[in-house]
Image: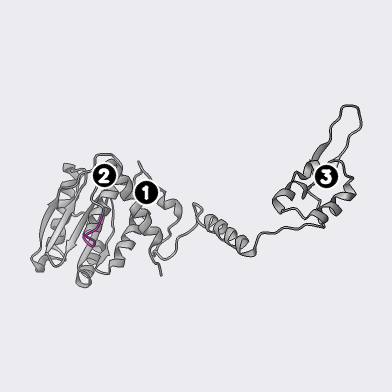
Amino acid sequence: MKLRALLRDKDVTEVAATLELIKPCVRELSSFLTTHETKKKGDGKSIQWMSDTEYICEVVRFRLPESVVEDALAELRGGLAKGPYTPLHGFGFDLTYADLFCFRDSAWLNDNALRAFTVFLSTYKNNVTAMVPPLKKGKMGKHILAPTSLDEVASGIEAHALVFMPVDFGGVHWGCIVVHREARLVKTYDSMGGERNKKRLKKMANELLAGPLEDEAYSDIKVTEPKQTDGDSCGVFACRLLWTCVDSEVPSDVSPSGVTKLRWAMLHTITTMKRS
C-alpha cells in the first residue's frame, strides 16, 4: 500500500478519517506523522511536503517501550560518566580517566597510571608497594633512598611476602625493585639495560641490604630480560615484571603487537577491578 499515492488527492481534513479507516502500520505511517501538504500558487508548481515540528498527531501516537527508553538512557549516562576528567574512586589517590589514556600505544606511563596498576596488584593480598620519589638527574649522592622509603620497605616486608618499588628515573624512564621475603632476594630490573640506571638500582639494593634487610641474609640479583625495543614502554615492562611475581598467567608476548595487547590488558584490570 502506497499511502502517499492514496492520500495525495484528498483534502487535509480527510487524511485523519482515511487513516482511521485503513489503520496502516506505524512504518508506513511514519512519513505522515509530522508532515502536511502545502500547495503553492503558480503554474507548474508541484505539491511539496514540508516538516512541521510543532504538529502533534491526534489520531496516531507512537512511543518506544519504557524498558527500551530506560536502557538507552542508561547507556548514554554510562558513556558520559567516563569523560576525561571523571574521577575513579577507590584507589586511595586522585585518579581520572585522563590519567589512563597513556595506556594507548607510544605513550609513557605517568605516575598515576602506574600507581593505579599497583593498587590492582595489591588485590592479590600478598604484596605492598613503596613508591620511590623521582630520582634527580646528575651524580649519585651518598644515599639514594630516603629514610621514609627504607621505613616503608621494613614495615612492608614484615607484613607481606613481596614489596614492589617502582623507580622513576627523572621523569623519563621507569625501573623497579622487588623485595622477595621467602626467596630472601632483592631483584632489580631495567628494561633498557642502561649502565647508569643499573648502577643506581644496584646502589639502592645495597642500601636495602645494609638497612632494613641487614639482619635477614638477603642477596640481590639483576633481572635482565625481557628488554623493550621501543622508547616508551618502560613502565609497561616494569609493571609486567611486578605482575609476574603474583600471577603465573601474565601475557608473555613482548613483541610490538604483544606489548599493545599487554597495555590493553593492564587498562582492563584497572577499570574492572572491585574498588572499596
Instruction: Read off the magenta span.
Output: 245-250
* Scheme by which the image is coloured: one colour
Chain-order first, disc 2 or disc 3: 3
Q: Marks 2/3: CA distance?
A: 82 Å
Chain-order first, disc 1 or disc 3: 3
- Please give the residue where the numbered disc 2 appears in the rendered image: 137
Q: Residue furthest top?
A: 44
- Please give the residue where the numbered disc 3 appears in the rendered image: 7
Q: Nearer the viewer, residue 46 or 151?
A: 46
Q: Please tell me how crowded label 1 is: few (under 14), some (14-19), or many (20+) other residues with Cα within 10 Å.
A: many
Could you say where residue 141 lies in the image, as x and y percent from the top left?
19, 50
Q: Nearer the viewer, residue 12 or 81?
A: 12
Amino acid identity at mark 3: Leu
Q: Nearer the viewer, residue 109 or 81?
A: 81
Is disc 1 in contact with disc 2, using a CB cutoff of under 8 Å? no
Q: Quadrant of residue 165?
A: bottom left
Q: Residue 103 shows which numbered tag?
A: 1
What residue sits 45% from the left and 54% below the top?
Answer: 97
Q: Residue furthest left?
A: 217
